[in-house]
Amino acid sequence: VEPPRVASARFNGAGTRINVPFTEETSVRDPPPGCGEVLDAASLEGLGASPSCLWPDKGTLQVLLGVGATVLPGHELRLHADANLRTADFVSDPAGQAPFVVLPPTVSAPPEIVMEGPEAIGSCDTATVTASATAARPLVYTWGC
């Protein structure tokens, strides 16, 4: 019997979670295993500090990224060699360690940006302008005149 396989891996719109549905329900136990038991060490490195792995159902893994996560669309993740995920009835071989690629979100949530400063200044005047943004992941931006 074929083992369950990762069907896809995709960021949510905010970039804070990776949804990983399997091709069928797995033998995930209750309580479900943590990220260190499901994903290999190299995969964990990009997930930030203290990521959480949740199983909303036996066929879907949700990886909630920790602070400082560096994983991006296009990065590869792998299941842990000892994850031992099988079909829900336990008759399959364990799921393998084939890499799976994290896809970008279907729709991205835009960051909220606020800029404050004078509406107008003279050609020889100086002005102070501040900008702030709210986003789930660190923003990279360039400021110039």
Image (spheres, rainbow, N blue to C red):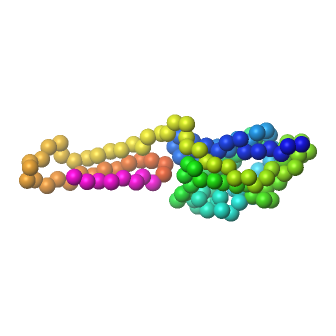
32 vs 24: above or below: below
Asked whether the viewer can see residue 84, the reply is yes
Question: Percent x, y for residue 5?
Answer: 76, 45
Q: Residue at x 56, y 48 (%)?
A: 73
Asked whether the viewer can see residue 31, the reply is no
Looking at the image, residue 34 sits to the left or right of residue 76; the answer is right
Quarter occupied by residue 87: top right
Looking at the image, residue 59 sits to the left or right of residue 50; the answer is right
**The one of 109 and 93 positioned closer to us in this rendering:** 93
Residue most extreme to the right = 91
Callout count: 0
Range covered by the magenta-colored residues: 138-145
**The one of 72 and 64 positioned closer to us in this rendering:** 72
Question: Percent x, y for residue 67?
Answer: 54, 58
Q: Residue at x 76, y 50 (%)?
A: 32
Does the magenta-highlighted stretch encompass residue 46?
no
Looking at the image, residue 109 sits to the left or right of residue 65; the answer is left
Type of secondary structure dominating the magenta stretch: loop
